[in-house]
Image (spheres, helix red, strand yellow):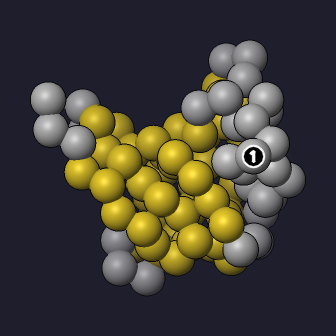
């Protein structure tokens, strides 16, 4: 199974709850346009995400694509 990972600058457009601990995040990037991804365990992981996944934050996002879906692995300001 091949995984591709990249770091992009993104503006958070909206977030919604996905299950108990995950967040579905819609972002706008300069290179990739609008994309949606899952931040796994975002509500429990204060080290990887903290309080950064709120609308209109400009972040540096590490994305990993697996099975055609985008996963947010880590974010920073």
| Residue at image point 75% right, 55% down | 53
Q: Residue furthest front?
A: 47
Report helix, strand or loop for mark 1: loop
Look at the picture and state if 1 lies above or below 3. above
Q: Quadrant of residue 32?
A: bottom left
- Residue shown at 23%/42% (left/top)? 3
Check the image and name the residue furthest to the bottom: 30
In the image, farthest residue toward the left: 1
From the viewer's side, name the closer residue of 2 and 57. Answer: 2
Tell me if 21 is positioned left or right of 61 in this view.
Answer: right
Q: Position of residue 68 (x, y in %)?
A: 25, 38
Q: Nearer the viewer, residue 71 or 73?
A: 73
- Left or right of 2 in this view: 37: right
- Expressed as whole percent of the image width and height from the top left, the position of residue 64 reads 37, 48
Q: Residues within 10 Å of mark 1 (few under 14, many from 20)?
A: few
The image quadrant where one finds the C terminus is: bottom right
Identify which residue is drawn at 34% across, 38% down: 69
Quarter of the N terminus within the rendering: top left
Q: Residue furthest top?
A: 20
Q: Position of residue 75 (x, y in %)?
A: 62, 59
Residue 7: quarter of image: bottom left
- Left or right: 72, with 76 as reference point: left
Count the numbered circles shown. 1
Please report the residue visible at 35 percent of the width from the left and 63 percent of the height from the top. 6
Image: 70 above or below 31: above
Residue at mark 1:
47
């Amino acid at each position: 199974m091949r995984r591709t990972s990249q770091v992009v600058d993104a503006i958070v457009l909206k977030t919604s709850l996905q299950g108990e601990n995950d967040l579905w995040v819609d972002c706008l990037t300069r290179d990739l346009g609008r994309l949606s991804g899952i931040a796994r365990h975002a509500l429990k992981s204060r080290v990887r995400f903290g309080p950064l996944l709120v609308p209109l934050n400009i972040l540096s996002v590490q994305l990993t694509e697996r099975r055609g879906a985008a996963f947010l692995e880590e974010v920073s300001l």
